[in-house]
Image (spheres, rainbow, N blue to C red):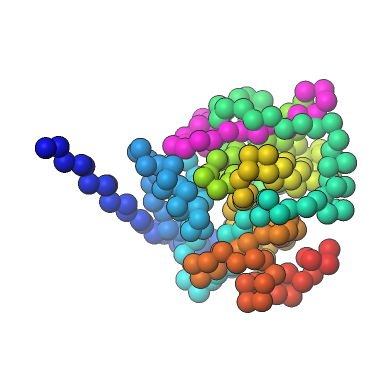
Amino acid sequence: MSQKTPPRPQFFYTTAPLPCPYVPGRTERKLVTEISGPEAEALHDHLSRAGFRRSHTIAYAPVCPGCRSCLPIRVDAQHFTPTRWARRIWARNAGIEGFEVPPRATTEQFRLFQAYQHFRHPDGDMAAMGFYDYRAMIEDTPIETCVVEFRAPDDRLVAACLTDRLGDGLSAVYSFYAPDLAHNSLGSLMILWLIARAQELGLPYVYLGYWVPESRKMAYKARFRPSEIFIDGTWRPLGEEGANPLSRLDASLQRA
């Protein structure tokens, strides 16, 4: 009589403290685990619902002592209705189309990625990435992943978003865009496109990673409503009493 192989134990590790990239003067630590094997998809789904994010074949979540500034956030795609602000974004970028392509790194993507890093994060670690580092970021994935390429009418690549397919939604892993079109709000356009795509696929959520209310660079994520943030082991509607520890900022964003 054959016996089933017992499931492999899942090990979690804590990284060494490093300077926080979002809040000056603080340090960050992450809880990490490997995503691999035949159960990678199911594990990734489970961890995503628990506030984890993916990088290559690793899932991670912040575990910074004395700090809870990084809040996992996801958009309720099926109940999302474009606001006047969202309609302006669509109109401003009329003619730009998104195309799902396999997760294969190209030199065209890499040139755009480099330009974005030097414009947006010149002092960050990613600004020093070479093509092979970029290729690993795109291609090292144990789950269903694609790159959504956004192209202008002349076929110029103007933005791209590495995107994971989850059981309950789409996850924006990393996105970048052409610096000369920064005024077009292409980052927001990519999120709106993913929301529309999730609606087409009948998927309930679009996962946007971590929202850091104290970071101006992350403020845009809270504009996509309705959305939920993960606090104390539960997804709660953003704006719900007690769901947002920085309620004043939340109120100001709703008025924006």
Dividing the picture into quarters, in which one does residue 250 lie? bottom right
Res 215 seen here: yes
Q: Position of residue 71 (x, y in %)?
A: 59, 63
Q: Residue at x 67, y 59 (%)?
A: 227
Of the pair 109 and 49, the residue shown nearer to us: 49
Which range is magenta?
Answer: 131-155
| 146 w.r.t. 241: above or below | above
Specify the farthest residue to the top: 154
Quadrant in which the C terminus is drawn: bottom right
Quadrant in which the N terminus is drawn: top left
Q: Position of residue 13 (x, y in %)?
A: 36, 56
Of the pair 183 and 249, the residue shown nearer to us: 249
| 20 w.r.t. 68: above or below | above
Q: Position of residue 165 (x, y in %)?
A: 55, 40
Dividing the picture into quarters, in which one does residue 215 lie? bottom right
Q: Position of residue 148 (x, y in %)?
A: 65, 34
Q: Residue at x 77, y 31 (%)?
A: 97
Specify the farthest residue to the front: 1
Res 190 seen here: no
Q: Exactly how many numbered labels are in the figure?
A: 0
Q: Residue at x 63, y 77 (%)?
A: 242
| 174 w.r.t. 94: above or below | below
Judge left or right: residue 38 versus residue 228.
Answer: left
| 218 w.r.t. 108: above or below | below
Q: Residue at x 60, y 38 (%)?
A: 162
Judge left or right: residue 40 versus residue 84.
Answer: left
Is 134 contained in the magenta span? yes
Of the pair 200 and 117, the residue shown nearer to us: 200
Dividing the picture into quarters, in which one does residue 217 lie? bottom right
